[in-house]
Image: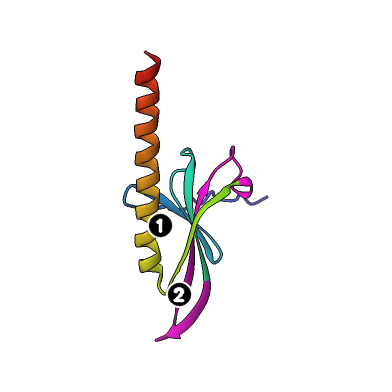
């Protein structure tokens, strides 16, 4: 019987957080955090034999537990390129995680 070799998938890191791809959907952020960004490529066009995203939906999701399917939509937008969508999504995620850290710090200080 032939043994299957385990292939390690490389995880793309952008600004310190992983980007995971599932078809035309990309997830950005640490799955251990309460928030994550989902990018859905809805339109593409061919440029020099390469598919390029021309319409990308951005969704900031608040996770409820471990499953992304039960996540609650917090913000939504649309951009005409993946790079423009990444700029928006990264900003949203960094902003909400910073607000969450500040809130938790104030809460901890108030409980002392």
Q: Dot 2 lies on which element?
A: strand
The residue lying toward the viewer, choosing from 53 and 108, is 108
Answer left or right for 49 relative to 42: left
Q: Dot 1 lies on which element?
A: helix
With respect to residue 53, does 27 lie above or below? above
Q: Which residue is drawn at 42% across and 75% down?
A: 80
- Residue tagged 1: 89
Q: Residue at x 46, y 84 (%)?
A: 46
Which numbered disc, 1 or 2, marks the residue that appears first in the sequence? 2
- Residue tagged 2: 53
Q: Residue 29 carries which label?
A: none
Whether residue 13 is visible, yes or no, is: no
The residue lying toward the viewer, choosing from 8 and 56, is 56
The residue lying toward the viewer, choosing from 94 and 31, is 94
Question: Which quadrant of the figure contains the C terminus?
Answer: top left
With respect to residue 89, does 42 lie above or below? below
Hey, which quadrant is residue 65 in on the image? top right
Answer left or right for 64 relative to 79: right
Start and end of the magenta stretch? Answer: 42-70
Main secondary structure type of the part rendered in magenta: strand
Whether residue 12 is visible, yes or no, is: yes
Residue, far right: 1
Colour treatment of the image: rainbow
Residue 93 % position (x, y): 40, 49
The answer to whether marks 1 and 2 mark residues whose Cβ atoms lie closer than 8 Å is no
């Amino acid at each position: 019987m032939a043994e299957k070799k385990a292939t390690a998938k490389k995880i793309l890191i952008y600004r310190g957080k992983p980007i995971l791809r599932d078809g035309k959907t990309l997830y950005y952020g640490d799955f251990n955090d309460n928030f994550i960004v989902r990018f859905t490529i809805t339109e593409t066009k061919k440029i020099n034999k390469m598919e390029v995203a021309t319409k990308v939906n951005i969704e900031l999701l608040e996770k409820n537990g471990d499953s992304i399917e039960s996540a609650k939509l917090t913000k939504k937008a649309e951009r005409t390129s993946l790079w423009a969508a990444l700029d928006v999504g990264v900003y949203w995620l960094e902003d909400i995680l910073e607000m969450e850290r500040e809130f938790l710090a104030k809460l901890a200080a108030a409980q002392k």
